[in-house]
Image (cartoon, rainbow, N blue to C red):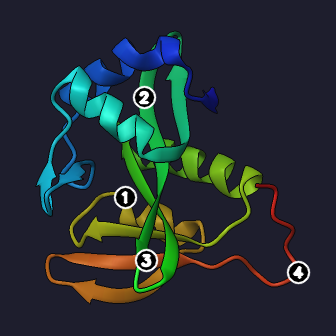
Amino acid sequence: MIKEYKKQDFIGLLDFITSNRNSDFYITEENRRKYVNTSYDLTKLIKSSNIIYLNKENGKILGVLLVWVSLGNNLKRKYIKVNAINKEVVKGLLTVLLWNKKSSYYVKIKKDSDYIKAFKEKGFIFKGNRGSEILLIKKMKSGEVKND
C-alpha cells in the first residue's frame, strides 16, 4: 500500500535505504553526491523534500519516492528521487504521485537504470543528456488542475 511518509516510518526507511543501495538516490552537499548512510543524512533528505511516498506491505518498505525543488537560473523545478525493489514498485509510486500532485516533474537518472522503463511508461520523455545520466521530464498538460 502506498502512503505518505510519517515520522514513525523513519527507522524502517533508514533501514530500507541503507540495505537497498541505488546510485540515483543520494543527497548533495557542497556540490558532491553523498549516499544516505546515517540518520543525520536521512533527516537532511527528508527536510529538503516536500513530498514523500512509501510503498509498504506487511510493515516492510518496498520503495520510496520523494520530490524536492531545485532553484536555478530563476527556474523552479520539481525533481523526483526514487528507490525501490523493482520497477513495478516504482510505477506504483509514480502513479500515486501523478494522480495526487498535478505538476511538471524532472528526474535525473543513470542511463543503465532499471527504472527508466517505468518512468517512460508513466509519460516521462527525454529532455537531455547529462554524461552517464539522462534528464527526463513529465509536463503537466494544459487543462489539468493542480491539486497542490
Q: Residue at x 23, y 48 (%)?
A: 26
Callout 2 crowding tier (Cα within 10 Å): few <14, some 14–19, many ≥20: many
* Residue 84 visible in the displayed image: no
Placement of 19 over or under 73, stated as above or below: above
Placement of 63 over or under 38, stated as above or below: below
Q: Helix, strand, or loop for circle 4?
A: loop
Q: Where residue 44 appears, x then y in whole percent?
A: 32, 36
Q: Nearer the viewer, residue 29 or 11?
A: 29
Mark nearer the N terminus (1 vs 2): 2
Q: Helix, strand, or loop for circle 1?
A: loop
Q: Which residue is mark 4?
A: 143
Q: Which residue is mark 3?
A: 136
Contact? badges 3 and 4 (CB < 8 Å): no
* Residue 69 visible in the displayed image: yes
The label on residue 62 is 2
Q: Which residue is mark 1?
A: 115
Gap between marks 1 and 4 measured at Cα: 28 Å
Mark nearer the N terminus (4 vs 2): 2
Gap between marks 2 and 3 measured at Cα: 23 Å
Callout 3 crowding tier (Cα within 10 Å): few <14, some 14–19, many ≥20: many
Q: Residue at x 23, y 73 (%)?
A: 111
Mark nearer the N terminus (1 vs 4): 1
Q: Kindly identify the amino acid type of the residue bearing the numbered disc 1.
A: Tyr
Contact? badges 1 and 2 (CB < 8 Å): no
